[in-house]
Image (cartoon, grey):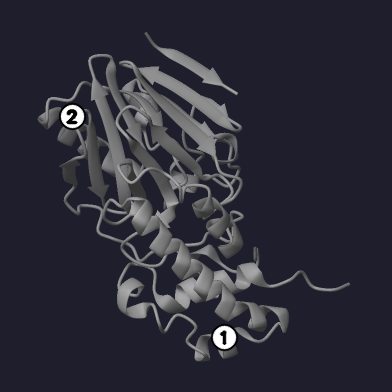
Amino acid sequence: MIVLSAAAGGSHAWAQVRPSPIAADTALRLTALGPTTTLIAGPTGNLVALTGPEGTVLIGTQARSVTPRVRTALAARGAPPVRWVFATAGDSAWEAGDAGWGLTGATVLMHERLAFARERRGPTGRPVRQPRVGFSEVVQLLVDSDAIHAVHQPRGANWAEVSVHIEGARVLYLGQSFTTDGYPAIDTVHGGSLDSLIATTDKFLDFATNVQIIPGRGPVGTSRELHVYRDMLVAVREKLRPFATARRPLADVLASHPTAAFDATWGHGPVSAPSFVTAAYMSLLPPPKH
């Protein structure tokens, strides 16, 4: 049975805070999370596949060039064709559209802010294919007796972030709102902020420790790792608040090294400490007085 029900600092350039590019031909790494779920680590982050007799559900998308490789990798493991895709607001999603999954016959679901992003253009400058299903707050998909809930998070790393919970498999996908390989990329152009990132993580701190929490990038975590991540974000915010209240120049903020206590652990990922601090600080600045 299949049931589908639907119920910043804008002046700061996104290119300054997006993760460093990774070669598009970087090998995919597939790791079994359980009998029906597989983690796919791709060039710019993590995807999750749920497989069963009714087909494969894919959570997350990357660049269109990665899509055929994901299909090939899943097929090599005996997975049935991908029938549903939850396209989340990853590194290239604002431009990549459905990443070509619609042309494979899959039904692509995406939050409405992302699904109908006006700035989306392909490499040739032409509009790319739009997903056919956009949702505002919640979508539930029942496949092979497992319930999948995709829930819009009112701003996390961006304003179209969703969490996806595969209940039976005990897997929670948090996308770009959670990273375990280094500092997160706060997309200030698309509504993300340090405050909203912390607010999103707060909602999931009490998840059971046997739930595998999938970050947008990096190794799988649990609620323990999410607590550590959230505590880092809060500590950095406390360092930045006095600067933001006084509207100090960004150069002064960077010179104070507000992430110094965390760089040994978090400073080796694709988002550098200065890039993270810049985006976080810009998002905390109070609006100018008129």
Picture coordinates of residue 22, whole percent (x, y): 28, 60
Kindly check if marks 1 and 2 are in contact, taking CB atoms under 8 A apart as contact: no
Q: Secondary structure at mark 1?
A: helix
Task: Point out residue 104 in the picture as x, y percentages from the top left corner.
Answer: 32, 24
Q: To which quarter of the image does residue 55 belong?
A: top left
Q: Relative to 117, is 237 above or below?
A: below
**On screen, residue 275 above or below 199:** below
Foreground tag (1 vs 2):
2
Return the residue at label 2. 35
Residue 51: where, in percent of width, then height?
24, 25
Measured Cα–Cα span from mark 1 to mark 2 = 48 Å
In the figure, is residue 125 to the left or right of 45?
right
Identify the residue under disc 1: 253
Q: Amino acid at mark 1?
A: Val
Q: Residue at x 39, y 12 (%)?
A: 2
Amino acid type, callout 2: Pro
Looking at the picture, does residue 71 appear above or below residue 41? Answer: above
